[in-house]
């Protein structure tokens, strides 16, 4: 490789690393998140171009004679880019968590494929440390692939419910230990020259374990699981980057792995749960987990009456949830909010860390509707203000506003931080029916004396509320 090509490649990897880290930093705020994604994408483009330059830099004469591998890589890049662009443009906001799970699984699968190529190169000389990292990366990547696909199927409705059998954890442990044993054989006995059937058995074991680990987990825990698999994918990519001595892969893997790990821990904390509790408990199965009888009754209200009450309020706090995304009502909601603010009402949005189906889901939804960032507040910044609010409005949220998390020690969500909407003078809950939340826990808020339920699709309810307020203005009030 000539020195000029080597210098350009090294500089490209450094630039890619900087763009990855800087892009991730900008993603930490809703204000700069969009540009952060563009910056990180530019970093990936630089890394890809550097990889092709590395191939051509090995031998300047290779340029006129593209090898089969380079052609296949270019075709794969073209197909992947086209499919991602097409599917990304078409995906609904409600299906974004599924897409994240699917893309994350593909990343884990790619890392596993890199490891498979290395493990099947029987003519290569394998050193112990790189070989060990290749096997560990293959294990993590394959688990992330199959586990993410199950998470996608659960969120997408292709798999309903959970799958549990007696001795599930013991069986999972046996499969995992057996897979580890095969991996240890590949590294320490076969020294990277194992029979292809043994390598295949290793990957099959890892894929099966990913399925078995994810199937028993309830839908309420899927956001945490997706974040965990995101961390797994990052680790796998980082390990395989070390095996290939590719700085871009190593840095990208470490950034994704560390960010995914921190996000997983933060989400588990927001649910007052440990990651091990998410993975190994039966929480989220739905139904029958809450103890004790709830006093009071659910009291319906008309959309117009609720809107008029808000129109004459001084302060309104809105807590959005997944139901808002399902109804695609964010634009109508903001139209209604602008009517309130024009009338002198102070309006704020309260966002729970796990509202929706993934972190930031509600922030993205509101940003799509044009809601100013200075109207949106995180749980720790807004919770103390609910006592001052004349009206709190809950749209499609459930578990994240359930006061049982503060008061009912027998509830499975006890200790989970919630939005204190029940402390407002009046609460209106917009929901489609009388169903329970994603975790299957009955919500005590719905039975409170200061709470009324406005039943119906959120978009239709918002249209009715807009009409009610406009009729007041038109009547000269």
Image: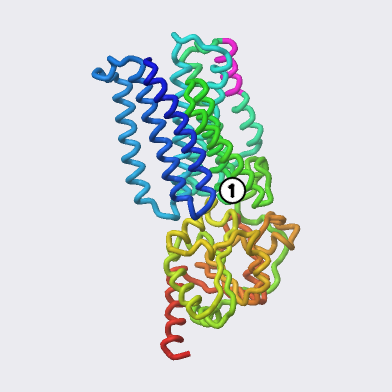
Q: Is residue 447 above or below residue 321?
A: below
Between 475 and 354, the residue placed more toward the observer is 475
Q: Main secondary structure of the magenta part?
A: helix
Between 155 and 58, the residue placed more toward the observer is 58
Q: Is residue 436 visible?
A: no
Q: Is residue 387 visible?
A: yes
Q: Is residue 143 above or below residue 87?
A: above
Colour scheme used in the picture?
Answer: rainbow
What span is in magenta? 178-189
Mark 1, other Cα within 10 Å: few <14 / some 14–19 / many ≥20: many
The question of residue 184 being in magenta is answered with: yes
Q: Is residue 370 above or below residue 54?
A: below
Residue position for label 1: 221
**Residue at the (59%, 72%) spot, across then down:** 392
Q: Quadrant of residue 346?
A: bottom right
- Side of 174 where 245 appears, left or right: left
**Residue at the (69%, 62%) spot, across then down:** 404
The question of residue 198 being in magenta is answered with: no
Q: Position of residue 40 (x, y in %)?
A: 45, 40
Between 449 and 355, the residue placed more toward the observer is 355
Q: Quadrant of residue 411?
A: bottom right
Q: Quadrant of residue 60?
A: top left
Q: Position of residue 436 (x, y in %)?
A: 58, 61
**Residue at the (55%, 11%) spot, across then down:** 191
């Amino acid at each position: 490789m000539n020195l000029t090509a080597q210098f350009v490649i090294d500089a490209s990897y450094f630039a890619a690393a900087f763009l990855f880290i800087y892009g991730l930093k900008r993603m930490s705020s809703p204000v700069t998140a969009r540009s952060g994604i563009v910056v990180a994408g530019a970093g990936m483009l630089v890394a890809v171009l550097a990889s092709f330059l590395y191939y051509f830099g090995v031998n300047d004469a290779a340029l006129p004679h593209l090898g089969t591998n380079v052609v296949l890589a270019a075709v794969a890049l073209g197909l992947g880019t086209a499919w991602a662009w097409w599917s990304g443009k078409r995906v609904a906001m409600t299906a974004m968590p599924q897409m994240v799970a699917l893309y994350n699984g593909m990343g884990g699968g790619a890392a596993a494929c890199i490891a498979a190529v290395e493990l099947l190169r029987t003519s290569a000389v394998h050193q112990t440390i790189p070989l060990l990292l290749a096997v560990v990366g293959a294990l993590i990547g394959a688990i992330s692939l199959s586990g993410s696909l199950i998470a996608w199927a659960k969120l997408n409705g292709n798999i309903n419910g959970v799958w549990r059998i007696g001795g599930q954890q013991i069986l999972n442990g046996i499969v995992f230990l057996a897979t580890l044993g095969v991996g240890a054989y590949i590294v320490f006995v076969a020294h990277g020259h194992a029979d292809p059937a043994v390598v295949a058995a290793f990957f099959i074991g890892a894929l099966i374990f990913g399925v078995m680990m994810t199937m028993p987990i309830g839908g309420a825990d899927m956001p945490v699981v997706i974040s965990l698999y995101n961390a797994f994918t990052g680790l796998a990519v980082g390990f395989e980057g070390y095996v290939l001595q590719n700085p871009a892969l190593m840095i990208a893997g470490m950034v994704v792995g560390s960010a995914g790990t921190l996000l997983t821990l933060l989400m588990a904390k927001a649910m007052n749960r440990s990651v091990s509790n998410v993975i190994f408990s039966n929480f989220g199965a739905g139904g029958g987990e809450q103890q004790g009888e709830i006093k009071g009754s659910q009291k319906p209200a008309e959309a117009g009456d609720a809107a008029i009450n808000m129109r004459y309020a001084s302060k309104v706090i809105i807590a959005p949830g997944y139901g808002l995304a399902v109804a695609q009502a964010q634009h109508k909601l903001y139209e209604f909010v602008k009517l309130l603010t024009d009338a002198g009402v102070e309006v704020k949005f309260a966002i729970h860390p796990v509202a929706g189906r993934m972190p930031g889901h509600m922030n993205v939804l509101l940003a799509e509707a044009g809601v100013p960032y200075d109207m949106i507040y995180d749980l720790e910044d807004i919770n103390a203000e609910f006592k001052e609010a004349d009206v709190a409005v809950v749209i499609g949220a459930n578990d994240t506003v359930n006061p049982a998390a503060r008061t009912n020690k027998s509830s499975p969500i006890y200790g989970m931080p919630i939005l204190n909407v029940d402390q407002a003078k009046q609460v209106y809950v917009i929901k489609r029916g009388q169903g329970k939340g994603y975790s299957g826990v009955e919500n005590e808020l719905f039975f409170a004396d200061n709470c009324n339920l406005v039943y119906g699709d959120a978009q239709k309810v918002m249209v009715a509320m807009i009409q009610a307020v406009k009729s007041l203005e038109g009547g000269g009030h």
